[in-house]
Image (cartoon, rainbow, N blue to C red):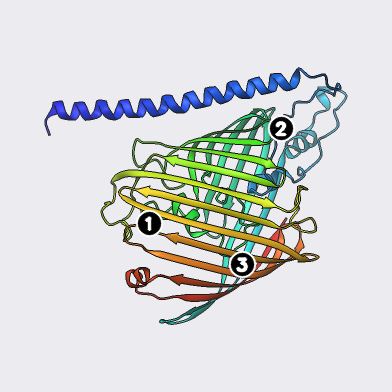
């Protein structure tokens, strides 16, 4: 390749990057204008006067880890203002700092027995995860979040947010990407002991090419709630690689999401990703992509969630029937994948729920590598976000998947104890 050809390729790539960056900036600008217009409309109506406050009202999703932390009380109450600045001693400043900090944690562990139809069986006690989260209001409109997972020994999330208003918030750092409804949810409320569905795990980074099973990425996010919280939007610009590592290429992935509450008990969701990944390993499901190669990495998801009641759920005594269903698809280079899952939780007696999950995924639509997981179980909530779980799962593979993996169908008995504070 001569120098003129290389120069032309470089100019083409730079134009592509500039076009994508301009598109994201335009989306952010238009959303900011919409948020400003709605805020102005809301403030034009006469309202009762309230005491001034430095705290911006923000709507939190209590199904997420951050939402769980936000619902907690600070480590200490705010200190009383001293008579003079000279009276602000060490105790005052210590209490002032700790009154801005919130801490929460949870752990999940249990027992799993696997029964293979044409192979050896196994059983083991297993610790799924131990998670510590710390959040702090570091200044008016500025918030910081940190999450560490002790089993893997890895820092999972760290970011700072600027929250000027409920309709417009910015986040810079590493957190779960907003692709699909399920990926941002906390493991403490997911129906299956195995956590996320096959398609969500795979398409949010868990495929062998990226090997990022956490569903997280590093980048910039803008999000907010509009029209009296009926519409929630998210726009992200992320690396598209592994957590706690620099980007493997100069391309960035754009993720967008819209969630709309048709009625208080029914939510519709669409999300998508467009970008490029850099393979950190080879994949038997996509053998044409080599290690270090940059490849097309596009995704989409659409689904709904229905609840039998509109009241807030505390995952203890206040619960209701919940049904969530979502279809997801993706392209990695020339290989396509597709999946669909449905999950339901039905309270039957006091703190006892019946749980059912159906989860289908085709890892390579050309090779027809299909697997369906069916789960049925019970869970008993002993306290808020604390539960005992017992489930039976059966995995069904089609003949192509059996031949490809060299393994047949299998079933599992799973139990888990979840504690949180």
SS under mark 2: loop
Q: Quadrant of residue 142?
A: top right
State the residue at coordinates (56%, 42%). Answer: 158
Q: Which mark is residue 306?
A: none
Q: Nearer the viewer, mark 3 or mark 1?
A: 1
Left/right placement of residue 19 relative to residue 99 reads: left
Q: Which mark is residue 109?
A: 3
Residue at the extreme left? 2
State the residue at coordinates (48%, 23%). Answer: 26
Choose the circle earlier in sequence order: 1 or 2.
Answer: 1
Q: Nearer the viewer, mark 3 or mark 2?
A: 2
Q: Distance of mark 3 from mark 2, alpha carbons?
A: 39 Å
Q: Distance of mark 1 from mark 2, alpha carbons?
A: 41 Å
Q: Nearer the viewer, mark 1 or mark 2?
A: 2
What is the x, y in percent for residue 389?
66, 69
What is the x, y in percent for residue 183?
55, 50
Q: Quadrant of the N terminus?
A: top left
Residue ID for mark 1: 208
Residue ID for mark 2: 228
Comparing 46 with 240, the one in front is 46
Left/right placement of residue 192 relative to residue 278 reads: right
Choose the circle earlier in sequence order: 3 or 2.
Answer: 3
State the residue at coordinates (64%, 48%). Answer: 64
Q: Residues within 10 Å of mark 1 (few under 14, many from 20)?
A: some
Q: Quadrant of the C terminus?
A: bottom right
């Amino acid at each position: 390749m001569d120098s003129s050809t290389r120069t032309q390729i470089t100019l083409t790539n730079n134009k592509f990057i500039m076009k994508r960056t301009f598109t994201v900036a335009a989306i952010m600008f238009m959303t900011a204008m919409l948020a400003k217009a709605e805020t102005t409309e809301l403030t034009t109506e006469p309202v009762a006067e309230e005491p001034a406050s430095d705290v911006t009202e923000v709507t939190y999703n209590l199904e997420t880890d951050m939402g769980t932390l936000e619902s907690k009380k600070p480590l200490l109450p705010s200190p009383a203002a001293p008579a003079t600045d000279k009276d602000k001693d060490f105790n005052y400043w210590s209490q002032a700092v700790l009154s801005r900090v919130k801490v929460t944690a949870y752990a999940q562990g249990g027992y799993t027995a696997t029964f293979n139809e044409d192979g050896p069986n196994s059983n083991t006690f297993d610790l799924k995860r131990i998670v510590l989260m710390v959040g702090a209001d570091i200044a008016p409109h500025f918030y910081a979040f940190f999450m560490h997972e002790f089993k893997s020994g890895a820092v999972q999330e760290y970011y700072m947010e600027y929250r000027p208003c409920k309709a417009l918030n910015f986040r810079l750092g590493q957190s779960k990407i907003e692709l699909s409804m399920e990926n941002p949810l906390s493991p403490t409320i997911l129906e299956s002991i195995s956590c996320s569905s096959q398609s969500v795990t795979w398409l949010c980074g868990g495929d062998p090419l990226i090997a990022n099973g956490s569903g997280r990425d590093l980048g910039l996010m803008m999000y907010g709630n509009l029209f009296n919280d009926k519409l929630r939007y998210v726009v992200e610009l992320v690396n598209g690689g592994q957590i706690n590592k620099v980007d493997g290429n100069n391309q960035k992935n754009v993720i967008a999401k819209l969630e709309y509450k048709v009625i208080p008990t029914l939510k519709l969701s669409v999300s998508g990703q467009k970008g490029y990944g850099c393979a950190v390993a080879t994949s038997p499901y996509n053998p044409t992509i080599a290690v270090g190669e940059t490849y097309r990495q596009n995704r989409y998801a659409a689904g709904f969630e229905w609840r039998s009641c509109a009241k807030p759920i505390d995952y203890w005594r206040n619960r209701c029937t919940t049904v969530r269903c979502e279809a997801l698809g993706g392209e990695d280079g020339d290989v396509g994948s597709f999946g669909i899952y449905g999950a339901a939780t039905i309270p039957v007696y006091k703190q006892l729920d019946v749980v059912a999950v159906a989860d289908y995924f085709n890892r390579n639509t050309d090779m027809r590598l299909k697997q369906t997981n069916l789960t049925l179980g019970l869970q008993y909530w002993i306290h808020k976000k604390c539960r005992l779980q017992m489930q039976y799962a059966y995995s069904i593979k089609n003949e192509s998947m059996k031949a490809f993996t060299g393994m047949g169908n299998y079933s599992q008995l799973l139990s888990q104890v979840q504690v949180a504070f």
